Each structure stands twice: as C-alpha cells, then as structure tokens.
Amino acid sequence: MDQKQDIRALNKEQLRDFFVSQKDKAFRGNQVYEWLWIKGAHHFEDMTNLSKETRKMLDDHFVINHIEVDDMQLSSDGTIKNAIKLHDSLIVESVLIPSKSRTTACVSSQVGCSLNCTFCATARLKKMRNLNPDEIYDQVVAIDKQSRLYQNHKLSNIVFMGMGEPLLNYANVLKAIEKITSDEGLAMSPSRITLSTVGLPKMIKKLADDKVKFNLAVSLHSAIDEVRSKMMPINKKSNLAELLESLQYWYSKTQKRVTFECVVWKGINDKKKDIEALVNYCKQVPSKINLIEYNAIEEDGFQQADAKAIEYYVRELERNNIIVNVRRSRGKDIDAACGQLANKKGE
C-alpha cells in the first residue's frame, strides 16, 4: 500500500481533524503529534498510550518515513559520521562534532548537490532530491541521542553545512528549523542554529524578509570575483557585489552579523591581494571570519596554504578589527571534515 501518506506531513490540526473524521476524540491527534515530534516515534506500535485498535487504524492509513543510521564511524578525535539511509534507500551523511564545551550536529539538506564547487566532495554527486522537513529533523534527533550516549550531554548546536545547498531547499529547511525550535519539537534556541550557504542573494533577502532568528554563514573563500568564480561557478551568476548587497540587506533587517567561511589554498588565495580584498569586503558589512583548514579530496589539485599565509590573514583581519577564528578540522580520518562528505559508502 504505497498510497499511504506519511503522517508527519500533517500538522497538529490536520491530525485532530483526522481523528474526528474517524469518529474519535480530537485530542488523540495531540497525542500522536507528541509521539511523532517530541518522543521521536518511528513506529505506531511505539505509541503505547493509544489502544491497539487505534494503532492499527493509524497503520492502515499512514506510514512514518523515518531515517535509519545505516553506518556509523567514530573518529579518533570523537567525531562521529553517520551514513543516513532514507525511506527510498538513498543515503546522506551527517556528523556529530564534539568540543570541550559543546556538541554540534552538521546536517544535510539535499541528497547530493547541484552547485559544482570544485573543492567539495559532495559536488561530485549529482543532486538527486531535496530532503523533507522530517528527514532533516530526524538527523538532529539521531545526533542528539549520540551526543547523550558518547558525550554525556545533549546536543547544543546545529549547522546546515552537510550535503546540499540549504537555500535551494528553502521551504523544507525552514519547516525543519521551525520544528527543531518549537516547544512541540526539540525546543532548541534558533541562536544555536547556523545555516551555511554558497551565497544566493535572492534567497538571502527572503530569509531577511521572513525574519528568521537563526544565524547565517556564507561560504566565501575569496573576495575577488575572478578567483571565486573559478572555485564556485555560482559566482558567475551572482557576483560578489550582488552578494554583498544582499548581506547588507540581511543585516539591516535582522541585526545579525554574517559569518564568512574561508579556506586558504596554496597559490590560489594566499597572496597579499587576496587578504586585502577580504579585509575590504568584510568592512562593508558587519561580519566575522572563520578560516577553515582545507581537507583534501582525491586528486583535486588543491593544497592547504602555508601556516605563514594563515598567520598573515589573521594578523591583517585583527588589525582591522574584524573577528577571526581559525577552525581546525575534525574527523579527517573518517572523511567527516568540512568538504569531505561524499557518501563513499553509497558508491
């Protein structure tokens, strides 16, 4: 009976209406909603405060298209990479990143990606489909359980930096975040969530207009159009000037500083002119910089910049009163680091 609807596509009012249509009490919808979203039930049989007849009736009408952790790899530094199997047997990856003070979930928003960034392993996979809100939500629930089990505390932060471009799955990503932050979901603060994008000006403005409360990060890598376009083809459609204008709009609406993510590569963006261009760009919108250690993917021709180049970046940014953090990669030994998510298990 593949005509059955996924029950998590219904909101609470629709669930209440369904029970009334079945000559049952509307509050049963509240009970089911709680099982689905707060308690994370993946089977109707788990809903133990419902009668067997009610559970069977739900099973006759609906399915719960839940995810499964198909494979889990534990890094020597405590990072966990999950191969997540979806209901249609497609695979995405998510990562638990532990640190001394917190644990962060890095979640995927699409199966594959269509943007072809030259330095990213995920770009080698064709985009197969968007993830549904519940599939994004389930990744967070799974990583929260792992955080409690392996790190002895609940998940503290979420970053949309896994497979896919979140702003090309706009509606589903926002629905997932709404559920994650809701008191009738995981009740996480939106200030602990960061959405990372290659920089789609039209969609960044839409985020601002929709008055989102979470944080925004942009995968920048270069503030010189010619250099950025070689690495990120999207820059040929929406250049740095358009991106900057959208980020200024974002700040005017949200008063939230944007985070620029920059990997520094040897011979590509490690020269004085690259640093000067980045400093100038950052001065035009309230921002901070994450300098990210590069993680090589097979035969891509990119090399991590020398330590002196990173030091020069840090020195010049700080001299211009721009906040900068150097992010050391985690989980490299299991291909879980930034830019390495390529679903090798699914090849």
Image (spheres, rainbow, N blue to C red):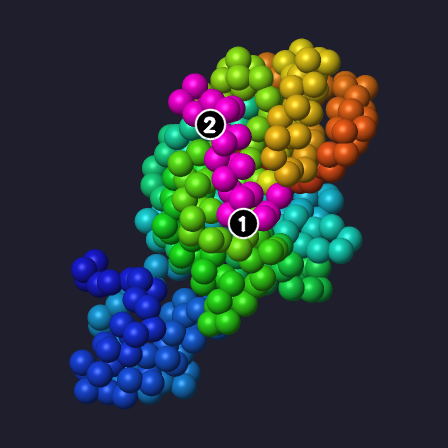
- Residue 72 horizontal side relative to residue 37, left or right: right
Seen at 74% across and 50% down, the residue is 99
Q: What quarter of the picture does the N terminus occupy?
A: bottom left
User: Mark 2 and mark 1: span between their CA atoms?
Assistant: 18 Å
Q: Can you tell which quarter of the image residue 91 is in?
A: top left
- The residue tagged 1 is 254
Residue 95, percent across and down?
Answer: 58, 47
Q: Is residue 334 above or below residue 301?
A: below
Q: Is residue 249 a member of the stretch shown in magenta?
A: yes
Q: Which mark is residue 179?
A: none
Seen at 50% across and 39% down, the residue is 249
> How many numbered marks does the figure carry?
2
Mark nearer the N terminus (2 vs 1): 2
Q: Which amino acid does the dot numbered 2 rest on?
A: Glu
* SS category of the residue bearing label 2: helix
Q: Is residue 22 visible?
A: yes
Q: Is residue 27 a member of the stretch shown in magenta?
A: no
Seen at 22% across and 83% down, the residue is 20
Q: Nearer the viewer, residue 227 or 239?
A: 239
Q: Can you tell which quarter of the image residue 220 is in?
A: top right
Q: Which residues are magenta?
A: 235-257
Q: Can you tell which quarter of the image residue 302 is in?
A: top right
Q: Which amino acid does the dot numbered 1 rest on?
A: Thr
- The residue tagged 2 is 242
Seen at 34% across and 37% down, the residue is 128
Q: Is residue 311 above or below residue 261?
A: above
Residue furthest front as drawn: 252
* SS category of the residue bearing label 1: helix
Q: Nearer the viewer, residue 50 or 252?
A: 252
Residue 10, percent across and down?
Answer: 30, 66
Residue 267, percent across and down?
Answer: 67, 11
